[in-house]
């Protein structure tokens, strides 16, 4: 029996790697909602957040900040994106987002809250990744600047603040439509297109002169009046315009800002943290006033995500307890997601087995349990290891602890490399994608392998290679060329390269062998690994990967080699160049 024959998933259905809050392709969004895995913890968080939205207007609450935190793999972007689609009640490929969400949620309490919110008022979501939006400009401005720019864009105004001010003035005077018609007639192009071009000020000024020569006596009058003026997006302006422009363009709707990667943006900057605090404070104060005056149906909410909890963000800059308390007061609802849900998510999304195959997999485990515990167990580590029938059947062809422990550390470490591409994604999404690609990618194709075949670390390298530094890839390539007649040398080198991102797992020959154990019915590859290590040590492997490998041994630079009992080899190793790769391979000689 082949591995693919045991799986419930149709492997022709691809899985995207990273959730992007600004990804609006309906096919992608439909899949994200339709395959979303809601764990008990996530279900409770949705209940807390939606309860606050539903009760806010009635209680006249000023608490309108929600902080969603969690390290790589916690699913922050999925959480807030689905929240936004459900609140806005979008239709995706003919299906209501609420209906897709309901099928995955299976919690009537939460669905009742959603229905209650929709019955009271429609919601407009303004959702963006502040790091992506910041890439449009070169300066690192305040969060108010980016919020205001996105607000203008989403409500149909120009993203240029001066041009937007003109549009608002004309709109207030009831002249905006006339301006746009005259612009179209003169320039044979819509204003909404040409306002993005360099000549927008002069062209707008010309039309204003035609419309009101008394106020604008020459064609360049308005252009000159704004030449030295700059509209500053302060917290006060953002809050004022959030309520005002919603009344103009979308009356009767509630507004919710959902901003991804806020924690990374404001980290270690007291000014940016204070800017955010002030915005949320003013949104709450103004919301209370306007809801009470019946000029708004709900306060404007702000949902922010961060890798760190709120107290960790503020403590990183040595802020005072008083300041911390002020910030926390603005975000009374805090959602801290955990990567422990990765196990359940990966199984349900990718590795779930057909019911008729479970008995055969269990029988296979019982037959080979002894070999697994002998050949695939890791030594000298406190990491949790799991060799049980139920988890084996759930995770095969992975070993369970390779998914929610080792793989997360490797992916997170790669993402933290200097100059790493941040589109690698959070660990949850990347581990899901990795599990899928492990089955179907041409470089691995485990789906076509017989049941019992295991995921090994060199196969993981095949899928992550493009995300690794040039130096790491070159080192592995050099070893492959130098030892073309011994595949184990390059397999060991690939394992060492990935283990350089794992801080608490000794790179001994036994552990490398365990992570390269190819099948539940195979012999241990320990002798092949030891032979490869000896060759690599003697060859003095390429001196790169600086700073990638951490010494996990408590004492003795040549501990692994000396414990192998080969004093001559230990003496040779002492004379080898002290490089990260050399040290990693030398220390693996246990």
Image (tube, rainbow, N blue to C red):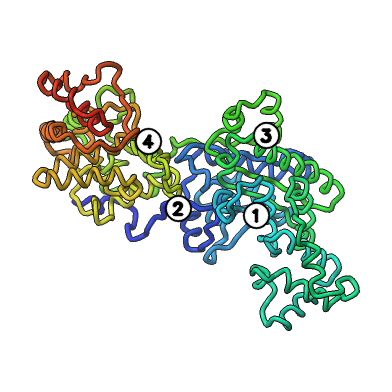
Q: CA distance from mark 2 to mark 3?
A: 30 Å
- Point out the tag, 1 or 3, that comes first from the N-terminus: 1
Name the residue carrying label 1: 125
- Point out the tag, 4 or 2, that comes first from the N-terminus: 2
- In the image, residue 103 above or below residue 373: below
Q: CA distance from mark 4 to mark 1?
A: 34 Å
Name the residue carrying label 3: 332
Say which residue appears at 21% left-offset and 54% top-offset. 448
507 horizontally vs 211: left or right:
left
User: Which type of secondary structure does the marked residue at label 4 adopt?
Assistant: helix
Say which residue appears at 67% left-offset and 24% top-offset. 320
Name the residue carrying label 4: 409
User: Which type of secondary structure does the marked residue at label 1 adopt?
Assistant: strand
The answer to whether residue 239 of the structure is visible from this angle is: yes
- In the image, residue 333 above or below residue 444: above
Q: Position of residue 78 (x, y in %)?
A: 51, 48
- Point out the tag, 1 or 2, that comes first from the N-terminus: 2
> Would you say the residues marked 1 and 3 are in contact, meaning their CB atoms lie under 8 Å apart?
no
User: Which type of secondary structure does the marked residue at label 2 adopt?
Assistant: loop
Q: Depth-wise, is mark 3 or mark 4 nearer the camera?
A: 4
- Point out the tag, 2 or 3, that comes first from the N-terminus: 2
Q: Depth-wise, is mark 4 or mark 2 nearer the camera?
A: 4
């Amino acid at each position: 029996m082949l591995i693919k024959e045991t799986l419930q998933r149709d492997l022709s259905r691809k899985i995207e790697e990273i959730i992007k809050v600004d990804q609006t392709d309906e096919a992608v969004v439909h899949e994200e909602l339709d395959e979303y895995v809601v764990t008990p913890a996530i279900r409770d968080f949705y209940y807390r957040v939606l309860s606050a939205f539903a009760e806010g207007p009635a209680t006249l609450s000023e608490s309108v900040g929600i902080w969603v935190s969690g390290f790589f793999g916690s699913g922050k972007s999925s959480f807030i994106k689905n929240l936004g689609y459900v609140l806005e009640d979008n239709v995706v490929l003919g299906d209501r987002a609420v209906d897709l969400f309901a099928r995955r949620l299976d919690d009537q309490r939460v669905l009742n809250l959603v229905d209650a919110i929709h019955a009271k008022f429609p919601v407009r979501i303004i959702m963006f990744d502040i790091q992506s939006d910041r890439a449009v400009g070169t300066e690192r401005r305040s969060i108010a600047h980016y919020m205001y720019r996105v607000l203008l864009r989403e409500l149909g105004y120009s993203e240029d603040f001066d041009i937007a001010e003109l549009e608002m003035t004309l709109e207030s005077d009831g002249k905006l439509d006339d301006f746009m018609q005259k612009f179209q007639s003169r320039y044979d192009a819509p204003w909404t297109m040409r306002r993005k071009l360099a000549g927008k000020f002069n062209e707008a000024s010309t039309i204003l002169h035609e419309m009101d020569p008394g106020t604008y006596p020459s064609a360049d009058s308005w252009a000159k009046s704004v030449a030295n003026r700059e509209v500053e997006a302060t917290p006060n302006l953002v809050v004022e315009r959030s309520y005002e422009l919603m009344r103009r363009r979308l009356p009767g709707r509630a507004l919710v800002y959902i901003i991804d990667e806020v924690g990374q943006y404001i980290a270690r900057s007291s000014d940016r943290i204070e800017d955010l605090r002030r915005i949320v404070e003013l949104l709450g104060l103004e919301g209370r006033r306007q809801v009470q005056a019946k000029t708004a149906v709900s306060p404007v909410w702000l949902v922010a995500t961060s890798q760190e909890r709120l107290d960790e963000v503020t403590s990183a800059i040595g802020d005072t307890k008083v300041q911390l308390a002020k910030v926390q007061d603005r975000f009374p609802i805090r959602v801290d997601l955990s990567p422990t849900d990765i196990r359940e998510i990966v199984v349900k999304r990718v590795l779930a087995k057909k019911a008729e195959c479970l008995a055969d997999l269990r029988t296979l485990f019982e037959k080979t349990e002894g070999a697994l515990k002998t050949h695939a167990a890791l030594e000298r580590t406190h990491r949790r290891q799991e060799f049980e029938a139920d988890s084996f059947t759930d995770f095969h062809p992975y070993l369970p602890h390779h998914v929610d422990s080792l793989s997360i550390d490797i992916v997170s470490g790669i993402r933290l490399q200097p100059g790493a591409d941040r589109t690698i994604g959070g660990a949850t999404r990347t581990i899901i994608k990795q599990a899928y690609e492990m089955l179907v990618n041409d470089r691995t194709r485990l789906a076509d392998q017989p049941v019992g075949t295991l995921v090994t670390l060199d196969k993981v390298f095949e899928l992550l290679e493009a995300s690794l530094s040039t130096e790491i890839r070159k080192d592995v390539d050099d070893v492959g060329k130098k030892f073309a007649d011994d595949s184990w040398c390059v397999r060991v080198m690939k394992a060492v390269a990935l283990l350089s991102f794992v801080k608490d797992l000794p790179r001994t020959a036994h552990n490398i062998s365990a992570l390269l154990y190819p099948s539940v019915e195979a012999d241990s590859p320990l002798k092949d690994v030891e032979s490869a290590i000896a060759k690599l040590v003697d060859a003095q492997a390429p001196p790169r990967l600086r700073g990638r490998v951490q010494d996990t041994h408590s004492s003795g630079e040549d501990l692994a080699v000396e414990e192998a009992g080969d004093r001559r080899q230990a003496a040779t190793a002492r004379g080898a160049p002290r490089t990260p790769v050399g040290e990693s391979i030398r220390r693996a000689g246990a």
